[in-house]
Amino acid sequence: MIPIPPRTFRCADCGWSKTVERSSDVVTEGYNIFSSCPKCRSNNIISHKHLSFAAIIVDFLTQLKK
């Protein structure tokens, strides 16, 4: 099983943020995925996943081969 990397959600309007670590592919709005801010209700949510060191190295080596 391939682990799912943690993802951080941040509200661009009020600064609220939450990092979630998922243990499965089940997504639940407001628990491990956010389309609106629970603090100010803005839809201006930015998210990014955290890459492991190994994933960064693999990506780097793949770029070198191109």
Image (tube, helix red, strand yellow):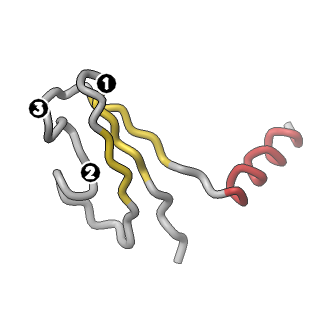
| Amino acid of disc 1 | Ala
Callout 3 secondary element: loop
Disc 2: CA contacts within 10 A as few (<14), some (14-19) or many (>=20): some
Farthest bottom residue in view:
1
In the orientation shown, which residue stands out farthest toward the top?
A: 13
Callout 2 amino acid:
Ile
Which quadrant, please, contains the C terminus? top right
Instruction: Say what secondary structure mark 2 lies in.
Output: loop
Name the residue located 37 percent from the left edge and 65 percent from the top edge: 22
Give the alpha-carbon distance from disc 1 to disc 3, as whole Å: 11 Å
Marks counted in the figure total: 3
- Residue named by callout 2: 33
* Mark 2 vs mark 3, CA separation in Å: 14 Å
Callout 2–callout 3 Cβ contact below 8 Å: no
From the viewer's perspective, is 65 left or right of 53?
right
Which mark's residue is nearer the viewer, 2 or 1?
1
Residue 16 pos. (x, y %): 27, 36
Residue 9's spot in the image, x, y percent?
34, 42
Look at mark 1 in the image and give the residue it sits on. 12
- Outermost residue to the left: 41
Does residue 66 sit above or below 8 in this rendering? Answer: above
Q: Nearer the viewer, residue 34 or 2?
A: 34
Which is more foreground, mark 2 or mark 3?
A: 3
Q: Earlier in the sequence, mark 2 or mark 1?
A: 1
Q: Which residue is mark 3?
A: 41
